[in-house]
Image: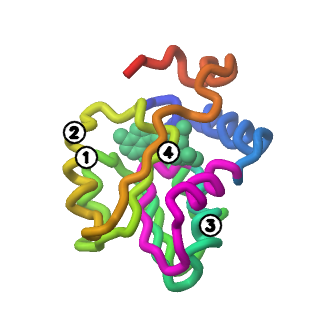
Amino acid sequence: MPSSYQNRKAVKFYIEERQRTGWRNRGERVVKFAKIKPGSYILDLCCGPGFVVKVIRERVGNKGRIIGIDSSLNLIKYADRICHFKNVLFKCGNIENLDKYIDNQKFDFVIILASWNWVKNKNKIFLKVRKVLKPDGKFVFSLTGDNLYHPLTKKFSGDIEKI
Ligand SMILES: C[S@@+](CC[C@H](N)C(=O)[O-])C[C@H]1O[C@@H](n2cnc3c(N)ncnc32)[C@H](O)[C@@H]1O
């Protein structure tokens, strides 16, 4: 798991950057791309500061359900502050153990955005995701961050491994 996201200063820097560059875009893109509907059940892996969950919550409304998992406690606390609803749950943990955090829930969509590069055992995640998807559910993932090659990204994350 990336240690940069555990560091308070780095997390503050990351959140400020996301606010400066427009935090809504990524969530709006995934809602449109995946055709997320009101009432959908969503699992957001590596949900970070909850910006994407916040936009998705606007779309799924009261009848949907969203669970976000991230290994950074600072980011999970922030996410819970900015997106506090009965049907939204944030859990701090490693997504490699995602089954530990969701009981027997099945999802319409499992998403992982701007985080795939951090995932060590990708096959394991594919298998676990398949188990928690509804039969017609979809796994949506983006391969890179929005600013992957921006100098500030490098400053924050160091050199990004090619996958
Ligand atoms: C670039 S951020 C993306 C946040 C969010 N998906 C978004 O698009 O706004 C990457 C996130 O992945 C999380 N992360 C990386 N590896 C993880 C793992 N194995 N389990 C849980 N979270 C992880 C980090 O803590 C960080 O919040």
- For disc 3, does the CB lie below 8 Å from ligand 1? no
Secondary structure beneath label 2: helix
Determine whether 76 is above or below 94 in the image: below
Could you tell me how far apart the alpha carbons at marks 4 and 2 are, in whole angstroms?
A: 17 Å
Residue 52 part of the magenta segment: no
Give the residue at x 45% y 57%. 44
Comes first in the chain, label 3 or label 1: 3
Could you tell me how far apart the alpha carbons at marks 1 and 4 are, in whole angstroms?
A: 14 Å
**Badge 4 amino acid:** Leu
Residue 99 visible in the displayed image: yes
The residue to which callout 1 is attached is 126
Comes first in the chain, label 1 or label 4: 4
Badge 4: few (under 14), some or many (20 or more) residues near its Cα, within 10 Å?
many
The residue to which callout 3 is attached is 83
Depth order, front residue of 92/40: 40
- For disc 2, does the CB lie below 8 Å from ligand 1? no
Magenta-tinted stretch: 25-48
State which quadrant residue 52 falls in. Answer: bottom right
- For disc 4, does the CB lie below 8 Å from ligand 1? yes
x, y (%) of residue 58? 64, 72
Residue 84: mark = none
Residue 113: mark = 4
Secondary structure beneath label 3: loop
